[in-house]
Amino acid sequence: MGASIIATASERNHDFLRSRGAEPVTYGDGLAERVRALRPDGDVIADFVGGNLEATLAVLADGGRHASIANSNVEQHGGEWMCVSPVGADLQKLADLVDGGKLHVEVAEVFPVDRAADAFRANMEGHTRGKIVIAVDQDA
Ligand SMILES: NC(=O)c1ccc[n+]([C@@H]2O[C@H](COP(=O)([O-])OP(=O)(O)OC[C@H]3O[C@@H](n4cnc5c(N)ncnc54)[C@H](OP(=O)(O)O)[C@@H]3O)[C@@H](O)[C@H]2O)c1
């Protein structure tokens, strides 16, 4: 779509972000300055972690748009609070994009259902790269 993307992660994931077409920056203290050094005004900012409102407002261009899946307070600052809605028709559109090679879903790990507790533990660590899948054995 012609957008240039800056994305946050810890350094061990920077090559991965580059491989997905984004310019990586490290999160934490000084995030806004690091982003501004790459691009002074962000037209669109998406927060997938929470706790980033201050940095978001610091780098957002006048008239820019921002949204968060992890901080409902964004609505008080002109942003959009977004929630997953598992609607079949929408999920089918996403599945079609995956089938067409236009959307890539990175899977960190697949757990059998009897290890669901381990799957939740891994997710709670907050440093998985991509999705954790709990697979139900259809034949069981
Ligand atoms: N609204 C909704 O519908 C919805 C849906 C799903 C999740 N959520 C919420 O979204 C949040 C994230 O959930 P998740 O399961 O997607 O998380 P996750 O996959 O565990 O996210 C971890 C990723 O965020 C990076 N990260 C960790 N701390 C960060 C920070 N302080 N600043 C920037 N990046 C950071 C990590 O990078 P490194 O590993 O490189 O450190 C890692 O890539 C949770 O609060 C969850 O409740 C909301």
Image (cartoon, rainbow, N blue to C red):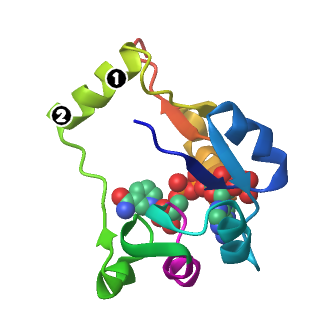
User: Which stretch did the figure color magenta?
Assistant: 48-58
Residue 29 placed where, x, y %?
76, 80
Q: Which residue is mark 1?
A: 97
* Residue that extends furthest to the bottom in the rendered view of this protein: 76
- Categorize mark 2 by other alpha carbons within 10 Å: few (<14), some (14-19), many (20+): few
Residue 99 appears left or right of 34:
left
User: Does residue 12 appear in this view?
Assistant: yes
Q: Nearer the viewer, residue 86 or 101?
A: 101
- The reply to whether discs 2 and 1 touch (Cβ–Cβ < 8 Å) is no
Q: Nearer the viewer, residue 23 or 13?
A: 23
What secondary structure is marked by label 1?
A: helix
Give the number of the mark in front: 2 or 1: 1
Figure check: 105 above or below 55: above
Q: Quadrant of ligand 1?
A: bottom right
Going by the numbered disc 2, the residue's amino acid type is: Gly
Identify the residue at horizontal 37%, vertical 14% (top origin): 100
Residue 3 placed where, x, y %?
47, 44
**Residue 77 has which mark?**
none
What secondary structure is marked by label 2?
A: helix
Q: Answer whether residue 92 is magenta in the image.
A: no
Identify the residue at horizontal 29%, vertical 20% (top origin): 96
**Residue 88 has which mark?**
2
